[in-house]
Amino acid sequence: MAEQPTRLMVAVNESTLKGYPHASISCRGAFEWALKKIVRDNVAGFKLLVLHVQVPDEDGFDDMDSIYASPEDFRSMKNRDRIRGLHLLEFFVNRCYEIGVACEAWIKKGDPKEVILHEIRRVQPDLLVVGSRGLGPFQRVFVGTVSEFCLKHAECPVIVIKRRPEETPQDPVDD
């Protein structure tokens, strides 16, 4: 019987930089690190599970006032979020296919901390890889970190990859 590939889950998110609808610096770095340091040339020995958790905006309008919103406005916002999520996953799926490693990718909505743990219980990966912005203790109090939460509560081994100092935006909370 053939050995099953190692199932490596990578949690990914969009960049928080305005006007930058791409993968965040830290998740892109964690993904590439996993390919380079774990998968290497053994593409047949791994399957990447790429999870993107979209955080629902309370009113669906980011920084806009929604007092005069119509039902069509909400449909448009939901469609925009779906397209952005698919665009994000497309980047990672294309990268997997470029090097020949099997993958699955999906989007869930909710609190990233809780959703990632739920998905770990559901799909039971062998390992979780997440990126980290490398925030200091003061910033972590206000922003919180998904990576620390996963380290403490995930039911599988977790590797946290910090972004490189030269990749840090002017505001380190941005990613």
Image (cartoon, helix red, strand yellow):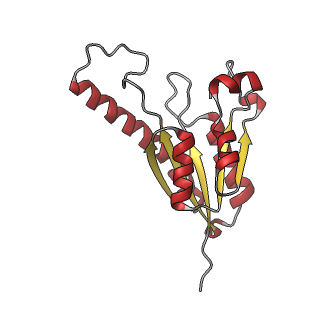
Residue 39, quarter of the rendered image: bottom right
Residue 45 falls in which quadrant of the image?
Answer: bottom right
Determine the residue positioned at 69% across, 18% down.
170
Image side of residue 2 versus residue 70, left or right? right
52 w.r.t. 171: above or below: below
Name the one closer to the observer, 136 or 50. Answer: 136
Pick the quarter of the image with the C terminus.
Answer: top right
Identify the residue at horizontal 52%, vertical 61% (top origin).
Answer: 123
Viewer-side residue, 71 vs 49 = 71
Decide: is 123 above or below 75: below
Does 175 sit above or below residue 113? above
Quadrant in the picture for the N terminus = bottom right
- Residue sitting at x 33%, y 29%: 77
Residue in the image at 62% along x and 41% along y: 28
Residue 56, percent from left and from top: 42, 32
**Residue 96 image point, x, y percent:** 56, 56
Please state which of residues 42 and 128 is positioned toward the viewer in this rendering: 128
Question: Where does residue 95 sit, x and y in percent of width and height?
Answer: 56, 51
Q: Position of residue 22 (x, y in %)?
A: 52, 34
